[in-house]
Amino acid sequence: ILNVEQSPQSLHVQEGDSTNFTCSFPSSNFYALHWYRWETAKSPEALFVMTLNGDEKKKGRISATLNTKEGYSYLYIKGSQPEDSATYLCATTNFGNEKLTFGTGTRLTIIP
Amino acid sequence: GAGVSQSPSNKVTEKGKDVELRCDPISGHTALYWYRQSLGQGLEFLIYFQGNSAPDKSGLPSDRFSAERTGGSVSTLTIQRTQQEDSAVYLCASSLGGASSYEQYFGPGTRLTVT
C-alpha cells in the first residue's frame, strides 16, 4: 500500500442495518489515523484519532478499530439511521510530518 | 464557541484573474491547514502553519499559489492567474497543535469556480 485507500467507494445500506468500511494505509512511519464524517453542504467533522495498534474507539453507534502492523482501520456503524448518510474520510499522519493524507472516502447512503 | 469560518463561501472568477480566500481559525488554535477537493478527488493538503514556525508549503501545486497567516490567526490563500484546474472546494482547518494527535476542525469551505 503506497497511499491511503478506502473501500468501498460508495455504499447503500437499509435503515436499521449495521455496516462497516475499510481504510488501508502504509504501515511504515505511521503515527496517527483520523476518521472524519463529511455531510453534504457541511464541514468535515472529526470522529476519532487513533495512534496505538489495537486501539478501539466508540462514539454512540459508531466505532473504529486500528491495526498499525498490517495497516488498516475499520469504521463500524450499528443500526444505521438516515442521519448517518455522509462521506466518511480517513487520513493518516506520519512521524515528523504534521500534514494529513486523506483517502478518497466512502460515500454512505442510508435507505429509509 | 465560534468555529472555523471561511469567506467567501462561493467565488466565480474568470481565468487569469487573482483570487484571495480567507480563513478565520478557532481562537487559541496554533495550527492552521489549507486543503482542497477537486471534482472526483480526495482532500489534498496544500499548506500548514504552526505557531511561529516556517510553514510547510509542500502541498502547493504551483508557484501561483501562496498563503500567509498574519499574527498567528487569520490566514489568506492567494491564487494568481487562476486556471480552470484550480476549480475546487478549498477547506481551511485549525487544531490545538499538530495533526499527529489533535483533531482538526474544518471550516465550511470556499467553492471556487474558474470560468
Image: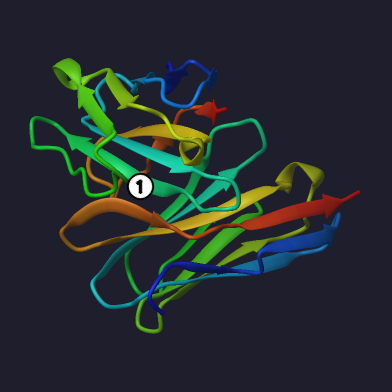
Residue farthest along the bottom direction in this orientation: A70
Q: Is residue B38 left or right of residue B44?
A: right
Q: How many numbered discs?
A: 1
Is A32 above or below relative to A70? Answer: above
Is A4 above or below relative to B29? Answer: below
Q: Is residue A107 left or right of residue B115?
A: right
Which residue has dot 1 on it?
B45
The image quarter in which residue B16 lies:
top left
- Which image quarter is the N terminus of chain A in? bottom left
The residue at 44%/67% (across/down) is A4
Residue farthest along the right direction in this orientation: A112
Is A38 above or below relative to B82? Answer: below
Q: Position of residue A19 (x, y in %)?
A: 72, 66
Q: Is residue B83 left or right of residue A74?
A: left
The residue at 40%/78% (across/down) is A71
The image quarter in which residue B6 lies:
top left
Residue farthest along the left direction in this orientation: B53
The image quarter in which residue B77 lies:
top left
Chain label for disc 1 = B
Where disc 1 sits, the SS reads strand
The residue at 41%/29% (across/down) is B82
Q: Residues within 10 Å of mark 1 (few under 14, many from 20)?
A: many
Q: Position of residue B46 (x, y in %)?
A: 32, 43
Q: Position of residue B37 (x, y in %)?
A: 50, 43
Q: Is residue A80 left or right of residue B40?
A: right
The residue at 23%/44% (across/down) is B98
Which scheme is used to colour this image of the protein? rainbow
Type of amino acid under label 1? Phe
Q: Position of residue B12 (x, y in %)?
A: 56, 20
Query: Which is more toward the observer, B51 or B75?
Result: B75
